[in-house]
Image: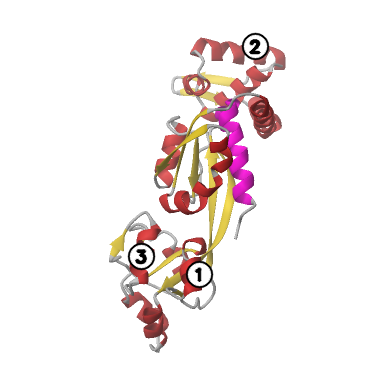
Amino acid sequence: MSLVRLRTFIEVYRQGSISGAARALNLTQPAVSQHISGLEVAVGRALFQRQPQGVVPTAAADDLAADIGNTLDTAESALASARARSMDVSGTLQIIGHADFMAEKLAGELLPLLENDIRVHMHTGDGEMVVQMVVEGHCDLGITAHPVSDPRLKGEVIFTDRVLAVAAPSVAHRLRQQPDFALALLQEPLLAYNLELSLIDRWLDKNLIKYDALLPAMVGQDLRGQRSLLCKGFGWTVMPEFLCRTQLDSGELVALGAPVGDTEIRYSLVWLPSALRQPRIAHARQTLVWRLANREE
């Protein structure tokens, strides 16, 4: 069985569509169909049932995908990285992720890529935007703190951090003077990433702080903006430790004591498996996974 046919099979299996796989692999639909037909001859069993809205894998396809899926991704990545070490990988890398993470964690790790003449275009967006831009091929790599359930994407956790409730010392002092910490906290102005209270809801739930509805005083999908307001003595929020470690060390901010404990955030690098056939993207993925995963705080 050729590697090309196996890659085509995996792409059709993940996409559930001949046309979708053709777009992802930059092949014609007849070419994809021929690859699948040739593989079915080699296997001796049908791999997909053709339907008006796409294809449905057979039991034989499920078994084959389970046997080769991740192994094929790993092999292609290794081959692409090996090629990258012996050939020109220059060009443009499109990467999208949360604005604050991109600026404060990712940018400093791009140096090896830039030194290899890889031009980097950084885009910002939340979890849904990251997935959409990577799946549609507008960006090569994405970084998200949201769980990724899209079967077309592969991902790897590259950074894990504690999530703390923080405020200025004056606000923390005021809260400590109150007999009911939870009630006093909910009465202070809240700064949030979005109206769904991402990060905040998990921290409140873990610390058994009940609330009916919280209307943030300020919403913004770059927690550095919240950090600036906190340092001016306004409100409180919940954020990853890497975004406030400097301010905690300097005394501009303090961590609000968690009655039960702090929570955790995980950032994942995501990509389309077919994209790793391009040496530049495979090299960039491997570089960022290694550098970020080895710099967890």
Q: Distance between the residues labelled 1 and 3?
A: 26 Å
Q: Can residue 57 be seen in this view?
A: no
Question: Which amino acid, mark 1?
Answer: Lys
Q: Is mark 2 on a helix, strand or loop?
A: helix
Percent from the top left, x then y, of residue 259? 51, 78
On screen, residue 118 above or below 242: above
Q: Does the magenta stretch include residue 275?
A: yes
Q: Can residue 28 be seen in this view?
A: yes
Which circle's residue, 1 or 2, is located before the other in the chain? Answer: 2
Please tell me in which quadrant of the rendered image residue 224 appears.
bottom left
> On the image, numbered disc 2 is attached to which residue?
38
Q: How far apart are marks 2 and 3 (CA)?
A: 60 Å
Circle 3: is it few (<14), some (14-19), or many (20+) Cα within 10 Å? few
Question: Which amino acid, mark 2?
Answer: Gly
Q: Quadrant of the C terminus?
A: bottom right
Please tell me in which quadrant of the rendered image residue 80 appears.
top right
From the viewer's perspective, is the residue at label 2 or at label 3 nearer? 3
Q: In which quarter of the image is the N terminus?
A: top right
Q: What element carries label 1?
A: helix
Please tell me in which quadrant of the rendered image residue 215 appears.
bottom left
Mark sitting on residue 228: 3
Magenta region? 274-293
From the viewer's perspective, is the residue at label 1 or at label 3 nearer? 3
Q: Is mark 3 on a helix, strand or loop?
A: helix
Circle 1: is it few (<14), some (14-19), or many (20+) Cα within 10 Å? some
Residue at x 64%, y 24% (from the top left corner): 87
Question: Which amino acid, mark 3?
Answer: Ser
Drawn side of residue 19 relative to residue 231, left or right: right
